[in-house]
Image (tube, grey):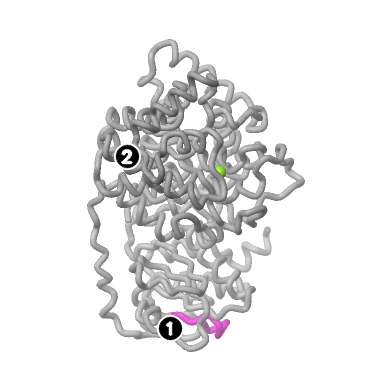
Amino acid sequence: MTSRDDRIEGVLLATAAGDALGAPYEFQPPRGPELDVTMSGGGVWAAGEWTDDTAMAIAIAEVAGTGVDLREEAAQDAIVSRWLEWSRGAKDVGIQTGSVLRSARIGSEITAERARSASTALHQGSGRTAGNGSLMRTAPVALAYLDDEQAMVEAARSISELTHFDPDAGDACLLWCSAIRHAVLTGELNVRVGLRHLTADRRELWSARLDAAEAGRPADFPSNGWVVSALQAAWSAITITPVPEDDPATEVFRADHLWLSLDAAVRAGFDTDTVAAIAGGLLGAAYGASAIPLEWRSKLHGWPDLDSHGLVNLAGAVARRGKVTAFDGAYRGYRTGALVPHPFDDKVLLGGVGALHQLPDGVDAVVSLCRIGDDDVQQGIPHVEVRLIDREDSDENPHLDFVLLEAVRAVERLRQDGRTVLLHCVEALSRTPTVAALYGARLRGLSMDESLDAITDALPRARPNSALREALRRLILTPAQSERR
Ligand SMILES: [Mg+2]
């Protein structure tokens, strides 16, 4: 997996992560540092459950993922139909979106044209159609046009106008999609990259709004039900949060900027899930799925019965315009092969992918360190998926140190819950022994060599590649180093 694929996969996942993180705190005032922010659920929301923001984005992504051009009328008909279908069982529908869907539908039928007319009529009646409801769902539009910026600009505005007539909403979607697209392509955070698509007077207006966002804190934009304040609060959360420098020995990583910024976005208060979902779309595009904490990834779920695995697949389908990259499950041929207990904890079993297909007795949690097929996900037990590539090229494993530590923390959490964990990759040659060595070193306070020697005694064929060994060296302090600290 290249970093660009990782960033594509980060867009919907981090949208959902921000959404689910903010959901329990919606309508509350700004949250001070003395209060925590956790993905714990609350109100009608289960822990990790996403809300309307992600659900409406998924509807757009499903249509884009079939390969159609979102500017086409038939594509927009399909989107509004899916929104209507979702809204019937939804726990929350935004005021403006709900009003448009209700006016535009005839029975269970709706068209894009009728939605647009209802949106226009709403604007003419109230003058107020600049809610944040089109911005919160716009991220997949950026993914659909990675190769065509002008088409993306047109599609972003057009899909916004299905429910939100006000030009501020269309401008916000266009600016945010431009930033997301730029982040996926380059890894850079630049919210001004889309300003050139606005007319001169609108450009000046939005430049001043972005300056204000950068000069303020997220809580300085409390009317964040308004699309302009929502964008300002999201951008403020991203820019006010310092980007940490990688220091693996103290467990501080540049990748932490993603979760720290989402935390800051939720602390804006009021429409917390939406501000954080908006911020998440851009942060995920810049840092990638690999920067999203695994504890969050393993909790995420929501309409229409998807989880993190499903969001990753969907983002890939949108970016490839519906072309399916065959993941042929070539691993299927592997026999169970190596399967041994961890030398320092016999409730952690180390194995290859074969063990996943026939779970050993007693195993009630799985941590996968390689890509697995959709059918390989066992229902009903915790299953954490970590993408690590078994090659030396560092570009293939973005945020490698962070990801390895996250994998070990996932094992540690499952063990604290009393689970028996299968830790596996394809053949338990490189990835599994690396994570197992880090787990052992942390559990027993051992040096890297002591821990890795014990693992390779248990798994005689294990040979972590040099990139993974280097990462272990950065992550595991020698006893002398830890004493000096
Ligand atoms: Mg919401």
Q: Residue at x 31, y 84 (%)?
A: 335
Residue 131: x %, y % from top left: 53, 30
- Label placed on residue 416: none
* Side (left or right) of 414 relative to 179: right
Q: Residues within 10 Å of mark 1 (few under 14, many from 20)?
A: some
Q: Which is the main secondary structure of the residues drawn in magenta?
A: strand
Question: Could you say which quadrant of the image residue 478 lies in?
Answer: bottom right
Residue 220: x %, y % from top left: 66, 28
Q: Is residue 191 visible?
A: no
Whether label 2 touches label 1, CB < 8 Å: no
Q: Residue at x 56, y 60 (%)?
A: 295
Mark 2 highlights which residue?
Answer: 77
Q: Would residue 276 be counted in the magenta stretch? A: no
- The magenta stretch is 342-350
Quadrant for the N terminus in the image: bottom left
For mark 1, give the secondary structure: loop
Residue 324: x %, y % from top left: 24, 56
Pick the residue in front: 431 or 100: 100
Quadrant for the C terminus in the image: bottom right
In the image, residue 110 above or below residue 47: above
The three-letter code of the residue at mark 2 reads Asp
Mark 1 highlights which residue?
Answer: 359
The three-letter code of the residue at mark 1 reads Leu
For mark 2, give the secondary structure: helix
Q: Is residue 61 visible?
A: yes
Distance Cα–Cα, label 2 vs label 1: 45 Å
